[in-house]
Amino acid sequence: MFVPYLLSIDAYGFYAVFQTTGLAVAQASILGTPQIILREPNRELPMAGFFLHSVGIAALVLLLMGFTVAHHDWMFYTLVALSCISVILYMQLTMRAKSHFQFGRVLRSESTGTAVFGTAILLIALMASFFGKSWLDYRIMGAVEILATGAIVAALLLGPGGRLTHRERGVREVREYLPSVYSVGVVVLFDVVIFRRLEVYFLQESPAGLQGVAVFGLSAQIFNMVLLVPSAMIEAWGPTFARSFRSGPSEFTQTVQQKLGKYRKLYVLIILGTLVLTPLLTATLFRKYQAWTWYITAFVLTRVVCSYAGFHSATLYSSRRERLLYGPAFAGAAISIASNVLLTLRWGVPGAVVAYALTQFTVAASTMAVAWWSRRPPAPLSPETVP
């Protein structure tokens, strides 16, 4: 949240392009590995094999980007590569700890990364107060982000219970899990289009330019902050869903309904808080974005409301029915591309708001529908069908 405060609007817009590119490449490279780790609670999985597999895909993606859409200098792609590696390690090691129900270790590691990031930002703020902000750009902030993520990874590996076992350092067994990684990965690739801020690239080419990118980037920072708690709850419940599914349909359904009741109560408070928090932030901390307050609020509220469906997609991942998400993912990706071409490129930020809402509500509604359908009790046999 301090980055958009420190950077100018145009500089933050370019930073948002860098951040989106790094996250998109990392997610496309890691595919369904985090979900596979979560649904195998208390098992030793080939973490080294998962990492090398993801890095290989990332190298291929970056190579293709360099030959096809190379609009930036070597420093941009170097930072993207380092960011991608740090995010891959972060996601895999965090899910490893959560699958072993070591949530305290995750919290301590996240605290370490937060402390490193906060210290770096404080030093940068002090330097900016003496030397001005003209020297601040995406490279400085990108390096700080990579450093903070690296601190979390180091804390996860070096802390108690963090050392990989001999089996986890293996590579050969990864082939056993690759079909599932790619099965979930199909949804993840569409997720890159739908959720990894595709609007950033369309806004960059729209009349809004980097200012539009900055507006959407700030919106993403706010809704990611708001969704920290519900996302953490869903990830914490993932191994529980997987274990209950193995115990039978009735226990799985009971577990889902129990957790869903808690989730609904929390979500009502989160939505109400979002309506108050977003305008408050633009009126106080981010005054240079006040002209776009209602657009930012619309982006944030759309994402927060539609993220309610994340609970239902988590139940499908945990019960090995991720292929039911292919339909919502494909529909969302198609609508995202079409609406951004028709609306965002022509109208800038207002068009992006409509395109984003169309995409998010389509995915959320269809995800909830297939999740509900998957949990239906089997129809009782009619007397004519009983032998």
Image (tube, rainbow, N blue to C red):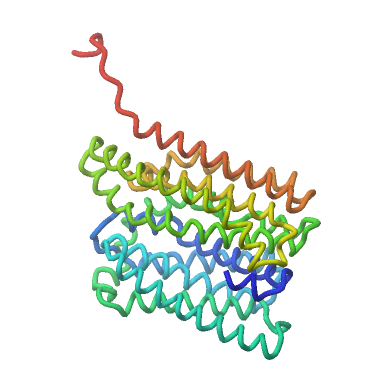
- Residue 65 is situated, as x and y percent measured from the top left of the image, at 63, 65
Residue lying at 74% horizontally and 49% vertically, measured from the top left:
350
Answer left or right for 120 relative to 376.
Answer: right
Question: What is the quadrant of residue 296 in the picture?
Answer: bottom right
Q: Residue furthest top?
A: 384
Residue lying at 36% horizontally and 67% vertically, measured from the top left:
49
Q: Residue furthest bottom?
A: 130
Q: Reply above or below: 56 against 354.
A: below
The one nearer the camera, 280 or 55, is 280
The one nearer the camera, 43 or 281, is 281
Q: Reply above or below: 148 against 100.
A: below
Quarter the C terminus occupies:
top left
Answer left or right for 363 relative to 337.
Answer: left
- Residue 185 is situated, as x and y percent measured from the top left of the image, at 46, 52
Q: Reply above or below: 114 against 61.
A: below
Answer left or right for 16 relative to 173.
Answer: right
The one nearer the camera, 70 or 326, is 326
- Residue 297 is situated, as x and y percent measured from the top left of the image, at 63, 53
Residue lying at 47% horizontally and 73% vertically, measured from the top left:
86
The one nearer the camera, 195 or 82, is 195
Question: What is the quadrant of residue 178 in the picture?
Answer: bottom left
Quarter the N terminus occupies:
bottom right
Residue lying at 31% horizontally and 80% vertically, measured from the top left:
158
How many numbered callouts?
Answer: 0
- Residue 100 is situated, as x and y percent measured from the top left of the image, at 26, 62
